Amino acid sequence: MGEGIHVSQTGYIRDLLRQHGVEEKPGNLTVPCTREWLQDEDSDEEEKTADEGLVRLAQKATGELLWLSTRSRPELAHPVACMASRSTRNPAKTLEIAKRVMNYLARTAEYGLHYVIDFEETMLTVYSDASYAPGGGRSFGCIMAQLHGMPICWKASKQPIVTLSVAEAELYEAVSAVQLGLGVGAMLSELGEKPVIHLKIDNAAAQGLASEAPGSWKTRHLRLRARFLRQEVAGQRLTMSHVPGSLQKADLGTKSFDVPKFKSLLELWKIVPFGHDVLKNTGARAELKDDLPLDTSFELYFVVLISGERAENAVMSELRKRVKEADYYFDEIYGNTD
């Protein structure tokens, strides 16, 4: 793992710990929050009015951790999503979850995403997974997209509708994952790339519903939902494959785990601490703080230069266009004075 880039927010985490009076204490890996604190029973009862001060504190804590979970710490996506769903109706529990996540961060302040390009992986791959009705109501899902094995975007949240089976919950997330992939693909098309999305799903039933195989009338409503996936496959914009549960990266954002399973998911995502294990043979940290040498980063400066020239040319072209338009309208109104 000597190659690649390590992306972390260690400075922000340490500042957050200081603000909350939590001492940094590196140690054995734990989970951000245990399952009993994240379980939430869905209820149709009216929400009770919570203390406004507690609600503000809960929303502040959620926002602080949301910044981490969406940038460099995807393993926090599930507990943060649980915090967001409770911040107004049960702020006290939200603050308890935040306290446990802070203790986890105190042990893992230097953890972050390690990016190493893997050309053996397809250019654009999306993963989807769902935890079926953990609270007896709506299911919890997670999707992620990666470029050549490197995660670039992810989302974990409760599904907006109540699904009636595991297959339906998985199918809903699969559709969401492909939509995410189409968004990433649109950005890649601006760079001249036209990748085919590869969907990896660990539920055989949901994968079967998205295929052209005939099915029972009992699953007709699910096949209507899967028609979008079949359309993308027919248009050669999407391929699908089954992935074992042990290799399902999206599982990270669906629920809480025991430590061994959690550790294996971190390894899949390459969420590791900054140190000699990650940046082997790179020497001391001081080497990483040296000024960027011009001779070894010519490509970077060249790209910046070209981008700057293109931007300048675009601005000048637009200015010339506006000047011509102004001259035209002036002549139309006042006549040509030449």
Image (cartoon, grey):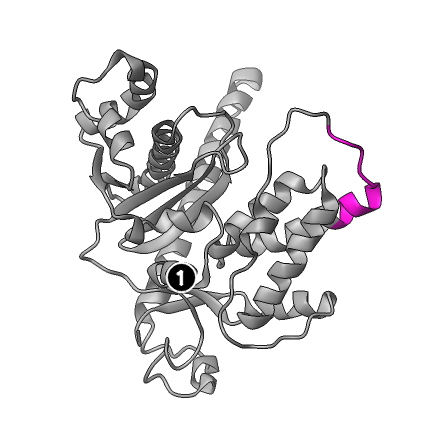
- Residue span colored magenta: 47-57
Q: Is residue 278 above or below residue 179?
A: below
Compare residues 140 and 147 and report the one nearer the observer: 140
Name the residue that disc number 1 marks.
Answer: 266
Q: Measuring 29% from the left and 19% from the top, which residue is drawn there?
A: 223
Compare residues 245 and 173 and report the one nearer the observer: 245
Q: Residues within 10 Å of mark 1 (few under 14, many from 20)?
A: some
Q: Is residue 120 above or below residue 230?
A: below
Task: Give residue 264's quadrant in the image.
Answer: bottom left
Q: Seen in the image, is 169 located left or right of residue 116? A: right
Tell me the kind of residue under disc 1.
Leu
Q: Seen in the image, is 114 located left or right of residue 236? A: right
Q: Across the whole image, how many numbered discs are drawn on residues?
A: 1
Q: Measuring 76% from the left and 50% from the top, which residue is drawn there?
A: 57
Relative image position of residue 293 (x, y in whole percent): 38, 79
Q: Is residue 117 above or below residue 204?
A: below
Question: Which corner quadrant holds the N terminus?
Answer: bottom left
**Residue lying furthest top:** 217
Q: In this orientation, does residue 235 appear?
A: no
Q: Measuring 60% from the left and 36% from the top, which residue is drawn there?
A: 41
Is residue 56 within the magenta segment? Answer: yes
Is residue 208 within the magenta segment? Answer: no
Q: In this orientation, does residue 200 appear?
A: yes
Say which element carries label 1: helix
Relative image position of residue 117 (x, y in whole percent): 27, 61
Relative image position of residue 251 (x, y in whole percent): 39, 48
Relative image position of residue 169 (x, y in whole percent): 40, 31
